[in-house]
Image (cartoon, helix red, strand yellow):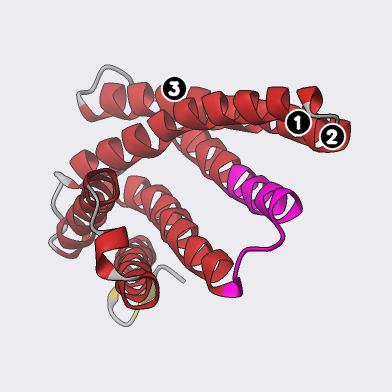
């Protein structure tokens, strides 16, 4: 099966996952504002974070609909943004591990220490994927299988890091209201949907 509803399977899923990412991010942002009050949500860092993500999602969505090769720009921006987020995740994981070890909670300290490897994987694979996508886009390499492999590994790293983050937040702070976990889950699911979109977008852009 190469087509669904008259469009290629890669375009169908690329557009579908990009649309899902947009919808999830909007639901998270609006729900966060309604539940936690808009002044708490409309902060500089939060607005920059959401605007950058929605820009990446929109570029992927629109350019895939139009069969436009500028979808590469959306892929590169998203991989760079999420990959660079792994750098901050590394710093936070290290700080939390140190804090829990010092405060006599070695189990949590050890778990946060292990999460450093996941964040390092997200950061490192983000950098490598970004470089290989650019090289393929500008015809510095014709090895599409390697580009796709790194994109898939980057997606896997994102899923694993997200899962580990949720587990650690729940173990370290189980007293948060349930909506806090739900909203965070929707936010990160939007990134996972966009990561899946990247794989199908690259398949669509593959040079024969």
Task: State how far apart marks 3 and 1 are (Cα).
Answer: 32 Å
> Disc 1 vs disc 2: Cβ atoms closer than 8 Å?
yes
Image position, residue 138 (x, y; %): 20, 24
Q: CA distance from mark 2 to mark 3?
A: 35 Å
Q: Which residue is under mark 3? A: 128
Front residue of 70 and 111: 111
74 above or below 54? above
Q: Secondary structure at mark 2?
A: loop
Residue 17: percent from left, percent from top: 38, 65
**Residue 207 visible to an observer of this rendering:** no
Q: Earlier in the sequence, mark 1 or mark 2?
A: 1
x%, y% of residue 137? Answer: 23, 30
Q: Earlier in the sequence, mark 3 or mark 1?
A: 1
Label 1 sits on residue: 100
Up/down of 128 relative to 176, above or below: above
- Judged left or right of residue 82, residue 86 is right
Badge 2 density bin: few <14, some 14–19, many ≥20, Cα 10 Å: few
Q: Which mark, by number, is residue 105? A: 2
The answer to whether residue 95 shows anywhere in this view is yes
Identify which residue is drawn at 41% across, 68% down. 2
Front one among 127 and 181: 181
Asked if the residue at tag 1 contacts the one at tag 3, i.e. Cβ–Cβ closer than 8 Å, the answer is no
What span is colored magenta in the figure? Answer: 159-178
Residue at 53 percent of width and 42 percent of height: 152
Q: Residue at x 24, y 51 (%)?
A: 43
Task: Name the spot of residue 51 as percent of width and height, x first.
Answer: 20, 51
């Amino acid at each position: 099966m190469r087509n669904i509803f008259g469009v290629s399977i890669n375009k169908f899923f690329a557009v579908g996952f990009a649309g899902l990412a947009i919808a999830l991010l909007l639901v998270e942002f609006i729900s966060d504002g309604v539940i936690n009050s808009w002044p708490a949500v409309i902060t500089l860092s939060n607005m920059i974070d959401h605007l950058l993500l929605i820009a990446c999602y929109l570029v992927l969505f629109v350019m895939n609909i139009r069969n436009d090769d500028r979808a590469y720009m959306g892929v590169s921006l998203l991989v760079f943004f999420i990959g660079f987020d792994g750098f901050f995740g590394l710093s936070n994981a290290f700080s939390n591990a140190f804090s829990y070890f010092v405060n006599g909670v070695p189990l949590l300290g050890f778990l946060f220490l292990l999460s450093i490897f996941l964040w390092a994987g997200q950061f490192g694979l983000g950098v490598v994927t970004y470089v290989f996508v650019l090289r393929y886009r500008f015809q510095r390499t014709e090895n599409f299988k390697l580009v796709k492999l790194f994109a898939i590994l980057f997606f896997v790293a994102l899923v694993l890091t997200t899962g580990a983050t949720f587990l650690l937040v729940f173990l370290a702070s189980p007293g948060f209201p349930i909506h806090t976990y739900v909203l965070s889950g929707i936010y990160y699911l939007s990134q996972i949907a966009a990561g899946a979109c990247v794989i199908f977008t690259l398949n669509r852009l593959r040079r024969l």
